[in-house]
Image: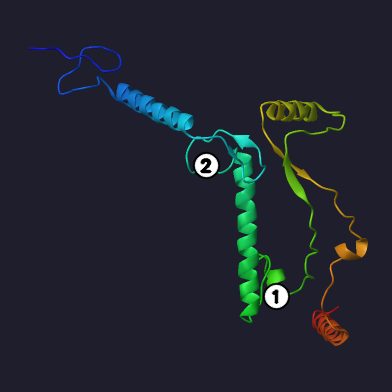
Amino acid sequence: MKVKTCFICKKDLPKRKTRFCSIACSEYNDVLKRKAITLRLSTLLEPRECINCKAMYPPKTSRQKCCSRACSNFLAAEYQKKKRAEARELTLRSGGEVVRGAGNRSRKIGQYAKPTAINIPKTLVGTAVFTRADTRERVDLQSKVEEYLANGGKIMKYGDQPAITISDSITKWEISSEEQDTATEKYRILNAYNGN
């Protein structure tokens, strides 16, 4: 009787095994196959330009459009922002009312003023300028960020932020003077019944 050996580790095969002696050897073979396919694909594909940061990169698959996870996440966030704006516009055109902050009951019933829209330009960059770190945690964070950038990572850089005036940040209660007088009178009547 011919004794077969494992395809990976070359040990004798147990009964009822035909190619691999264990699940570990079988999974290792699958990993080797996947790596070979990835290497073969990456050598066949031409370097291409990232659709976000315009940097050239070697793609790992034929469907890859971005050079890194950071660029991909940035584009996904921009796409979701655009879809929400389109849905909001469609709701307004159909005569509906757009409710911001659906989880906040006070915003649903219109007690707060509309939020101030601030458009801050943002880009992905591979360099950064740091202020002097004065605590141990900030020194550790700065060293990790510098190491990340040195390894080719990218971080979000925000442009100059516009100054907000104090009047923009004050909550405006949309209530008329008649409604205020009515509410004050109800409050006085309730306190009269409570003995105050």
Residue located 61% across and 57% down the image: 80
Residue 60 percent location from the top left of the image:
50, 35
Residue 160 percent location from the top left of the image:
85, 49
Q: Given the image, on which type of amino acid does mark 2 rest?
A: Gln
Q: Which residue position holds label 1?
A: 109
Element type at marker 1? loop
Q: Which residue position holds label 2?
A: 64
Label placed on residue 190: none
Q: Nearer the viewer, residue 89 or 106?
A: 89
Q: How was this image coloured?
A: rainbow
Label 1 crowding class (10 Å Cα cut-off): few <14, some 14-19, many 20+? few
Give the left or right position of residue 7, taking residue 63 as reference.
Answer: left
Residue located 85% across and 83% down the image: 176
Q: Nearer the viewer, residue 27 or 170?
A: 27
Element type at marker 2? loop
Residue located 65% across and 45% down the image: 52
In the image, which is nearer the foreground, mark 2 or mark 1? 2
Displayed quadrant of residue 165: bottom right
Residue located 35% across and 23% down the image: 28
Residue 167 percent location from the top left of the image:
91, 65
Give the left or right position of residue 73, taking residue 24 as reference.
Answer: right
- Sequence-first disc among 2 and 1: 2
Label 2 crowding class (10 Å Cα cut-off): few <14, some 14-19, many 20+? few
Q: Is residue 12 above or below residue 106?
A: above
Displayed quadrant of residue 67: top right
Residue 24 percent location from the top left of the image:
33, 23
The quadrant of the rendering that contains the C terminus is bottom right
| Number of dots carrying numbers | 2
Displayed quadrant of residue 33: top left
